[in-house]
Image (cartoon, helix red, strand yellow):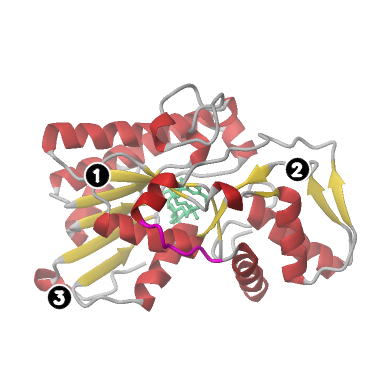
Amino acid sequence: MAAQNGEAKRTKVPMRVLVTGGTGLVGQAIHRVVQEDPCEDEEWIFVSSKDADLTDPAATQALFERHQPTHVIHLAAMVGGLFRNLKYNLDFWRNNIRINDNVLHLAYENGVRKCVSCLSTCIFPDKTTYPIDETMVHNGPPHDSNFGYSYAKRMIDVQNRAYYVQHGCKFTSVIPTNVFGPHDNFNLEDGHVVPGLVHKVYTAKRDNKPLTVWGTGSPRRQFIYSYDLARLMVWVLKDYQEVDPIILSVGEEDEISIKECAELVVDAMDFKGEVIFDTTKSDGQFKKTASNAKLRKYLPDFRFTPIKQALKETCDWFTENYDTARK
Ligand SMILES: NC(=O)c1ccc[n+]([C@@H]2O[C@H](COP(=O)([O-])OP(=O)(O)OC[C@H]3O[C@@H](n4cnc5c(N)ncnc54)[C@H](OP(=O)(O)O)[C@@H]3O)[C@@H](O)[C@H]2O)c1
């Protein structure tokens, strides 16, 4: 996606934010949030792999030279569901290490004032106590299924600390729980829980067939709406001063079961057919409860969109954009 403002403004703009991964689920949500509340002295630039392949140092350097950002939100990553992770752990490791090293080092070389990168709650140690908090990222091996992705993500935190200690850089990271919203990847084979359910309910309704949910429906998850995450990430960019990561999540009390989530999607789509839980399929981890106490210490009054409303908006978006949505 091209820069939003022209070359002429470049020298006058005090804050020029480069968003890598700007065409993805989270990037598109940040795009909408900053469009809804524009600031005159800010320029936001949203880029995708078509603007630069960030695994390539020369292409990354050219991107930074072209846009000369003062701030970076770094979202670009090789991401995927369980089966893609299981199959391509090496690719997840190598591609993400390259992308992150290129972006962080060019941010340093170009004097970027603040860089916010994205970790994930799925990179935490497999064997842990609950709730998970920010101090536990490096406490033990991640789950076997996605160790390539997880270790590459964890190294962002190591690099942030090293850039701070050696060069005083203000590079930090956020740790979102399961994100969902418009522009998600709704692929049935390889998507995440919510977009997978939305797509399944859509086709079950269209084809007048029962809905089959994989597993017992009892595992519990915290879901964050992409627009809430976007608003929080803009706050982190502007106001959060720590190098240590911060978990961006709804509270422990807002964790819901997959069954409850499926029922909300069924209601939102007005699906009247039969719902079957295929208990021969694996449930995955029962829970991964994360604490948002640190976030609440900073922003006690932040209001998350109620999950019912957020899921309804996501279902409506998918229905309206069925032909072009990522499936
Ligand atoms: N989705 C979740 O539930 C979740 C949860 C926790 C953390 N996160 C993290 O949040 C961040 C954003 O995730 P998302 O769900 O928004 O991902 P997404 O929708 O899959 O988008 C990924 C973005 O990264 C870009 N990208 C991928 N490989 C690239 C490369 N080699 N060079 C340049 N750009 C590249 C893609 O560009 P193209 O469009 O051109 O392919 C796209 O803009 C990621 O760092 C992810 O790890 C996501």
Is label 3 in contact with label 2 (beta carbons under 8 Å)? Answer: no
SS of the residue under disc 2: loop
Crowd tier of the residue under label 3, counting other residues whose Cα lies within 10 Å: few below 14, some 14–19, many 20 or above = few
Does the magenta portion include 25?
no
SS of the residue under disc 1: strand
Q: Nearer the viewer, residue 217 or 252?
A: 252
Q: Is residue 277 above or below residue 98?
A: below
Q: Residue at x 25, y 59 (%)?
A: 238
**Which labelled disc corresponds to residue 67?**
none
Quadrant containing the C terminus is bottom right
Q: Is residue 197 above or below residue 165?
A: below
The residue tagged 1 is 171
The residue tagged 2 is 218
Q: Is residue 325 above or below residue 178?
A: below
Which quarter of the picture shows residue 35? bottom left
The residue tagged 3 is 9
CA separation in Å, label 1 and label 2: 38 Å
Q: Is residue 252 left or right of residue 135?
A: right
Start-end of magenta stretch: 299-305
CA separation in Å, label 3 and label 2: 53 Å
What amino acid type is highlighted by mark number 2? Ser
